[in-house]
Image: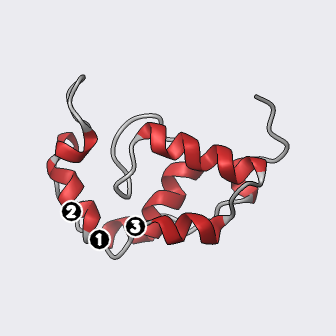
């Protein structure tokens, strides 16, 4: 698949300071990285992400950093790949993505 624009051009940059205020900051990392075969929505992190006021910042950072593993903003790697593809192909924009959260 050939994409015409870099992900950085279609996803906002929120920097990194937001991470220190995120509810997940003090949680163990394994809450966001399920064991192989486990579902992402069965992790302890799923509930934390669901009520997090920083989901947009988290998702934007995960997309910009091309995170291939873990739960970010209640999205799995496959979900983020689908979002990134839509953004890069122009079939969705950042507002569409934020409305999905």
Which residue is denoted by mark 3 in the rendering? 55
Q: Residue at x 72, y 59 (%)?
A: 10
- Quadrant of residue 55 in the image? bottom left
* Pointers 3 and 1 in contact (C-beta within 8 Å): yes
The secondary structure type at the circle numbered 3 is helix
Residue 95, compared with residue 25, is above or below; it is below
Q: Nearer the viewer, residue 96 or 57?
A: 96
Q: Nearer the viewer, residue 62 or 94?
A: 94
Q: Looking at the picture, how far across and down is residue 84, in whole percent?
A: 62, 47
Residue 55, compared with residue 29, is above or below; it is below
Q: Residues within 10 Å of mark 1 (few under 14, many from 20)?
A: some
Figure quadrant of the C terminus: bottom left
Of the numbered discs 3 and 2, the one sitting upstream in the chain is 2
| 65 displayed left or right of 87 | left
Q: Residue at x 14, y 50 (%)?
A: 44
Q: Residue at x 19, y 60 (%)?
A: 47
Can residue 38 be seen from the camera position used here?
Answer: yes
* Pointers 2 and 1 in contact (C-beta within 8 Å): yes
Q: Looking at the picture, how far across and down is residue 91, in whole percent?
A: 73, 54
| 22 displayed left or right of 75 | left
Which residue is denoted by mark 2 in the rendering? 48
Q: Looking at the picture, how far across and down is residue 86, in whole percent?
A: 67, 49
| 101 displayed left or right of 3 | left
Which residue is denoted by mark 1 in the rendering? 52
Can residue 65 be seen from the camera position used here?
Answer: no
The secondary structure type at the circle numbered 2 is helix
Task: Identify the residue at the far bottom of this view.
Answer: 53
Q: Looking at the picture, how far across and down is residue 63, in whole percent?
A: 55, 50
């Amino acid at each position: 698949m050939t994409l015409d624009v870099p992900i950085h051009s279609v996803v906002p940059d929120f920097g990194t300071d937001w991470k220190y205020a995120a509810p997940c900051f003090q949680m163990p990392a394994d809450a966001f990285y399920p064991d192989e075969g486990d579902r992402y929505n069965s992790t302890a992190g799923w509930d934390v992400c669901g009520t997090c006021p920083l989901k947009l910042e988290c998702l934007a950072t995960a997309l910009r950093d091309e995170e291939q593993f873990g739960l970010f903003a209640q999205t799995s790697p496959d979900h983020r790949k689908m979002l990134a593809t839509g953004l890069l192909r122009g079939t969705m924009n950042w507002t569409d993505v934020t409305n999905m959260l």
